[in-house]
Every structure is written in structure tokens, then in C-alpha cells.
Amino acid sequence: MVPTISAPDSHAPLNLRTKVGYGVGEISKEIPGSILVFFLLFFFTDAVGLSPGLAGSVLLVGKVWDAVNDPLVGWLSDRTQSRWGRRFPWMLWGAIPLGISFWLLWLIPPLPSQWQLFAYYTFVLSLFYGALTVIAVPHSTLAAELTQTYDERTQLASFKSAFSIGSSILGLVIAQIIFAMVTDVGQRYALLGVVCGAITILAVYGCVWGTYHRFWQLQGKRGSVALVGPQSMGQQIKELLKIRPFVYLMGIYFCSWVGLQATAAILPYFVTSWMGLSDQHFTQMILAVQGTALFMMFFWSPIGQRVGKRAVYCWGIPLTMLALMGLFFLQPGQTGLMYGLGMLAGMGLSTAYLIPWSMLPDVIDLDELHTGQRREGLFCGLMVQLQKLGTAMAIFMVGKFLEGSGYVASVGESAVTQPDSALVAIRWILGPLPVVVLLAGIGCAAMYPITRQRHDQILLKLKTSRPS
């Protein structure tokens, strides 16, 4: 049973409540996600005492399950029938498991062996990723279901990106406050887990409240095309992978995520081991990067509405590449320059948040034009899967590179002098390697074919083909 909502003007503008409500949903993903990226590998090696290779393998093993659940949840949500719609039931039921599993991830169980710890964290991380999928895929799908036009997608994506970056900053601020207040390593991470877990639960419910009305307004118009075909999930994935713009979009997103997450994962090692600074400088460095990215979001969004999404990405990412190469050549003692390069990296970083998710609804419209189906869930499931695979691959590779370079893990407050081979590896992982990956992403963006003019043509054809 669908709630009764008066029929809207088909050209009703995207209102502030919807934009903010959708943005709040990012808090439930980005606070735990950013803390995981910035601290999890470091927590495993320097708080729990896992070897770098085994710590990185925790994420890789978790992906054996996670590689299935993203498209699966998207495919199932496309077929969900409920008085709450197709997406909201998943979010409402997944919120509490997400918060609890995130808290469990930051506990240090009294287990005697490395392999027992490996088993515990692999199990808990799999639970966390499963709950995150139940939230992330339906939430990401809402972007296509809350908007109608090319510029609306950019506007909503700018709010998504701003809240995403802002949530990352908030997570780091919370971490810095807790780390300053609590001296015991185990207690500080446990407190971080419970505080941020509670915030994620509240954010999910806030998102549902803020987007519910607009969702049903547009669904009243799209109800006749909301059904999907009878094909299996595997058959539909094969169909989606034949859509050339979607393949290029996946390349953009995957390269962006792998490159940037590898940088995020290695940054604490760079700041502490190479630059010889305290971990407080690491969080301050991240705040400089993310704060600049948040500020630049208000610059890139209107530029994107003028020159197009593809051009903005190709203009912004080279700034990040330049900053990473600058960090590669940075020497200990050049702390001020380190922060300056971090701000330069943030200027381009915001386009990696903004552009891929503003492109995806346009691809979904193209698919509807060709098939008559709205398969938002499956599209977003594949995109969220790419995000998680990119994160896991980046952290796994960082762990393996560190282990192969002879990095010495430390536990607690003890300081360890790293061998030269480890210091060289840290600099290469931060600079040249992610630059090469980001360059491949620019190549995919250059070939992405859906411009504003082409999308206008798609919308015009959809208006004539949709049943009235």
C-alpha cells in the first residue's frame, strides 16, 4: 500500500529538505567508512598487534562475501514491494546492525593467537559490510529516484559529496577528541566505535524522514516504469555491463577510489614514520585535505553545471595528482609544505566525490530508454561494490607492500625505527602509484559519452515513451 500524497508538478524543483535529508544519509556511510580507511589498518598493526600482511588480508577475505551482497541487495530491492517503497525498508532494518557491528570492529578481544584475531575481525568485518550494503545501496539508489534533470543530479550529488566529506571530517574530529581524552589505546578505539556507531543509526532514520515525501511524489509519476524484467541477477548484470557509458563510469569510480583510498591508508605511516611527526599531525593533515575538498565542492558544483561533469573531473583530479607527487619528494621537517600539498590534494579530491554519482542517474535514464526498466538498485549495487572493492584492494595492497618492505609493527606507545626499505615503500605508495591509477581514471572520463545535450535528448524520448 502506497501512502497517499498529492500529485506533484512534474517540474517541481528539488527542495532543501530533500537535499539535506539525502545528504544526512551519507553520515551513516562516511563516518564509519572514513574511520575504517584512516585507522583500521593502523589499529590492526599498532593496537591489536596483527602483522601487516594478515591485517590487510582481513579486508580481502571479507570481500569474498561482500563481492556478492552489493548487487544482490540492489537486485532484491528493485523487486521489493512494501507500503514504504522499495528502498526504505532495507535502510530501516539495517541501521541498528550497522551501528553495533561497527562498534564490535574496534574491540580488542582477549584472544591468544594471530589467527584467532584474524578470524574474529574477518567475521565482524563481514557483518559490518553486510549491514553497510543494506544501507548504502538503497541510499545511493535514491539519487536517481529523487531527481529528474541533468542539473538536479549535479545539485543532489553536490549535497551528497558535501555531506560525505563533512562526515569524514566529523569522524576525524570525533576521533581526535576521543584520542585526546582517553590515553588507553584499547579504550579509545572502543569508545570511538560506540559513539560513531550510534551516530550512524540516527543518520539513517534522519535520511528516511527527509527524503520520504519527495520519493513518493516522483514515484507517482514513474510507477508505470518501475517494474524490472524477469531475468536472473546474473543475466541483468551482463546486460548492464554491455552499456558502454556505464563501463566508463565504473572505470572512473574504481580508479578514483583505489588511488585515493591507498593514499588515505598509507598517510598515517607517512606522517609518523617518514615525516617523524605525532599522530595528531595525521588527523590535522586529513582535516586540511577534507576541509579544502568540502570548500571546493561549492566551486566545482556550479562549474559542472556550466561546462559538464566530464570536464570538471578532468580539471580537478590532476590537482590531486600534482599534490601526491609533491608529497613523494617531501622531506622531513617540511611540515608547512606538507599541509599546503594536502590542501592542493583536497581541491581535486572533491571532484572524485561529486562527479561519478552525478553521472550514474543519467546512465540509468539511458538504460530505461533502451529497456523500459528502472534498475536503479542493481546499478547502485555494482557501484557500491566497486567502492568497497576499491577500499579493500587499496588497504590489502598497502598492507602487502608494507610487509614486503620490512615494516616493523609496533604495539601501544612504543616507537619503532623503520628500515629504509619501508620508508621508500611508504613514499611510493603515497605518490607515484596512486597517480598512475588516477591517470587511468582520467582516461575513462575522457571517453564517457553522456553530455548535457545527449541527456536532454534521452529525457525527451523518455517523456514520449512513458505511459501517461
Image (cartoon, rainbow, N blue to C red):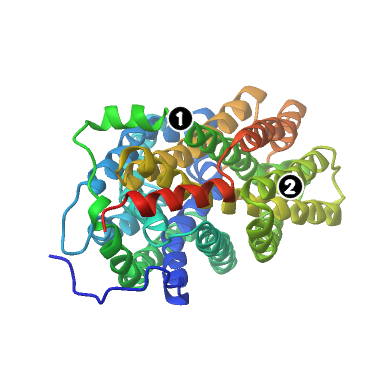
| Disc 1: which residue | 57
Q: Residue 369, image x and y in percent?
A: 38, 43
> Which corner quadrant holds the C terminus?
bottom left
The answer to whether the residues at label 1 and label 2 have Cβ atoms under 8 Å apart is: no
Q: Amino acid under label 1?
A: Ser
Taking the spot 63% from the left edge, 61% from the top edge, the residue there is: 301
Q: Quadrant of residue 447?
A: top right
Q: Please give left or right for residue 254 compared with residue 108 in the image.
A: right
In the picture, measured across the screen, residue 327 lies left or right of residue 150, that is right
Q: Residue furthest left?
A: 1
- The answer to whether residue 437 is seen in the rendering is yes
- Give the structural element (helix, strand or loop) at label 2: helix
**The quadrant where residue 151 appears:** bottom right
Element carrying mark 1: helix
Between the C-alphas of marks 1 and 2, the distance is 35 Å
The residue where tag 2 is placed is 315
Earlier in the chain: of badge 1 and badge 2, it is 1
